[in-house]
Image: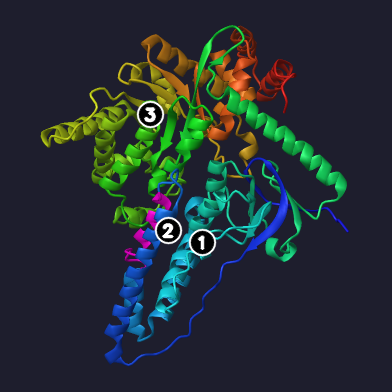
Amino acid sequence: MSQNIFLKGIAASPGVAIGQAFVCTLQTIVPTRRELPPTQLEAEVSRLYEALKTTEGQLAHLRKKLPADEHGLILEAHSLMLEDPLFVDAAVNTIREEAVNAEWAVFEVTQALLSRFDTMQNAYIRERRADVKWVSDRVQKNLDGQVFDEEEDTFTVPENSVVVADELPVAKAVFLANEKNALAFVTQGGGQTSHTSIVARAKQLPAVVGIPTLLQRIKPGDCLIVDGGLGEVCIQPDEAALVQAKLKQQQWHAQQIQAQHRAHAPAVSLDGHRVSLWGNMEFVEEVDTLLQMGAEGVGLFRTEFLLVGRDNPCSEEEQFWAYRRVLEAMQGRLVTLRTFDLGGDKLSGDSLEKFLGEPLEKEANPALGLRAIRLCLSHRELFRAQLRAALRASAYGNLQIMFPLISHMSEFYEAKRELEECRSSLSLQGIAVAKNIPVGIMVETPAAAWIADRLALEADFFSIGTNDLIQYTLAIDRQNSQVAYLYHPLHLSVLRSLRHVINAARNANIPLSVCGEIAGTPKYIAMLLGLGIRSLSMAAIQLGKAKESVQNTSLAQTQRMMETVLEKSSTEEIDAFIEAQTNAMYAHLKP
């Protein structure tokens, strides 16, 4: 008998799926600890190296099995772990110092690494633990002499399956996402930045993650409704719940079809004004989805995600190939590469020290400390490697470069000087670089906003990063649940700052876009258009709804709306007024 048991998790990828639970379990390998005589230790180290070499060969084989639209970068990162001193040298030292077998050494080192991952504050890094465990288990199997079985990672699933797991390492997530029978992902672990979530969004599969006690509640074959938008899973739904879910599923599919139909139509307002819609991206694998959803270019390529989750620098060559792939895939569309925004909540503490190879002073407030352009200018080799890689890649597409967290004119001058020195160096080496590469800044500090008229004389373009601009303007840590309720895009100070930056860009005749989270939300789109913004950049999944919003908006009406808004004082009053205006504006649109 149906019970309609609802489990709440994290909404990782929108959409609705109805199917049977296919429970995917990962074998946990716990080897036996054996003490060895000193005469056998070097042979044991050699056996470990042989297992690492075998594992690398297997990963190379799996990379070749990936579909054409997956470039294998995510599996290449696993190969790097097989050379990482934190893993390899630690295991070798454990064999020699504790006189134990290689299996136990790998297990002991892995457990220590997993414990460190669990305590990391950065969610993206913390969620890489599944990948560490997966690589470690592969090494263990090779030490044990188990025959490589690619079906373990590339297996097929039954029709109409909802994949249920504790957590999915990236290889399984990628292969399962390309299985036509896999309708959705549901996991006990993970968050919005886990590989399961990223792959699900890229493949437009519904996903709910982070459900405590999931595997205790769901049995193989259970009928499940997965609502990725609400972050909810219904177990053994009754007929009424199934009917409602099917209706919502049909509505969602209809909206997606409409979005696909609109994807390559221009975003033109009711009164004939053209608005550019761009995509934000973090991973090379997201390019295909951006193109499918009609992105006119990449408004924000967050390059720091090439670095998180690793303890060694990403080489110039690795970066060059990543940037080149994006530029080539975008087929001449403009790509805005933001230089590393490291520090703060991106990569901090011990991880940042390991990455940079030197100790850093502990910061009481990392968000206001050594991050973004400040960190790059204090670690020039890191910065130069990225700039050289970007300049080399510019020959393969349409590139512009953007510096984050600028707050002083001198920072912008210095960053541009480094870029020009890298360009000169490459020219002397005979390496091709695009002739015209626009160089701009991300306006995300009040300092930059209020000297925007001066910065506009030096910058080729502006992009407003509203996430940080709001945070810094209102002196609110948006990650702090105690004050998050005060974080509001419609505070008058934020609106005035936006207007000042818009006027500065207009007077200097330079392009301006908005790439923060509000750029993809209909209510805020109307507000931004009313202030004078004509270019917006957002996540791929938001592009369809944003285009629909623009096509049903009168810019003249939004301008009148914002003239009234800027005469008001309280955030609550402004919010209520814009809410009423936009509800009336979009009343005929489906939710």
Q: Nearer the viewer, residue 438 or 340?
A: 438
Q: Nearer the viewer, residue 117 or 262?
A: 262
Q: Earlier in the sequence, mark 2 or mark 3?
A: 2
User: Looking at the picture, which amino acid does disc 2 mark?
Assistant: Leu
- Residue at screen point 39% across, 84% down: 101
In the image, residue 586 above or below residue 424: above
Secondary structure, mark 3, is loop
- Residue at screen point 80% across, 55% down: 236
Q: How is the image coloured?
A: rainbow
Query: What range is drawn magenta here?
Result: 72-87
Residue 283 makes an appearance in the image: no
> Which residue position holds label 3?
331
Q: Position of residue 37 (x, y in %)?
A: 32, 93
Question: Dots 2 and 3: beta carbons under 8 Å?
Answer: no
Give the distance between the C-alpha atoms of the residues marked 2 and 3, in whole angstroms: 28 Å
Give the distance between the C-alpha atoms of the residues marked 1 and 2, in whole angstroms: 9 Å
**Where, quadrant-wise, is the N terminus in this rendering?**
bottom right
